[in-house]
Amino acid sequence: GLDGAHGVLVMSIDSDSIADDNGVFADDLIVEINNRPISSAEDFQRALRALKTGDDVVMKVLRKDRSPVRRAWIVSFTMP
């Protein structure tokens, strides 16, 4: 739905997980974590390793919103 977008595609979400509790959905494309661009699985893993318990996390995701076009959403939560 968005040509040229780079990120990590969320394939599924475990119920009752931190992602589920904070509004991350399957088919979201994560493009940024705490202002760090995410364009590969390696970028995503690196960003996750940098997080510590109690850190605030802001993810920018692209999401289909009742149309074939993806729109940007901001998901914010605190690491448990």
Image: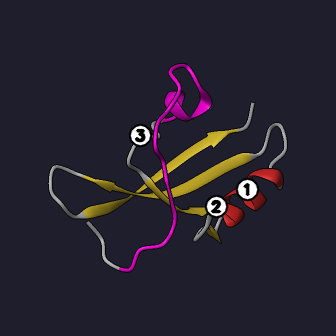
Query: Element type at marker 1?
Result: helix
The reply to whether callout 3 and callout 1 are in contact (CB within 8 Å) is no
The CA distance from mark 3 to mark 1 is 18 Å
Q: Is residue 33 left or right of residue 27?
A: right
Please tell me which of labels 2 and 3 falls first in the chain. Answer: 3
Q: Which mark is residue 66?
A: none
Please tell me which of labels 3 and 1 falls first in the chain. Answer: 3
Q: Residue at horizontal 57%, vertical 71%?
A: 39
User: Disc 1 residue type?
Assistant: Gln
The residue singled out by tag 2 in the image is 41
The residue singled out by tag 1 in the image is 45
- Count neighbours of disc 3 (C-alpha within 10 A) and say few if under 14, some if 14 to 19, many if 20 or more: some
Quadrant housing the C terminus: top right
The CA distance from mark 2 to mark 3 is 17 Å
Q: Is residue 18 magenta?
A: yes
Q: Is residue 20 left or right of residue 55?
A: left
Q: Is residue 28 magenta?
A: no
The reply to whether callout 2 and callout 1 are in contact (CB within 8 Å) is yes
SS majority, magenta: loop
Q: Residue at horizontal 34%, vertical 54%?
A: 63
Q: Which mark is residue 25?
A: 3
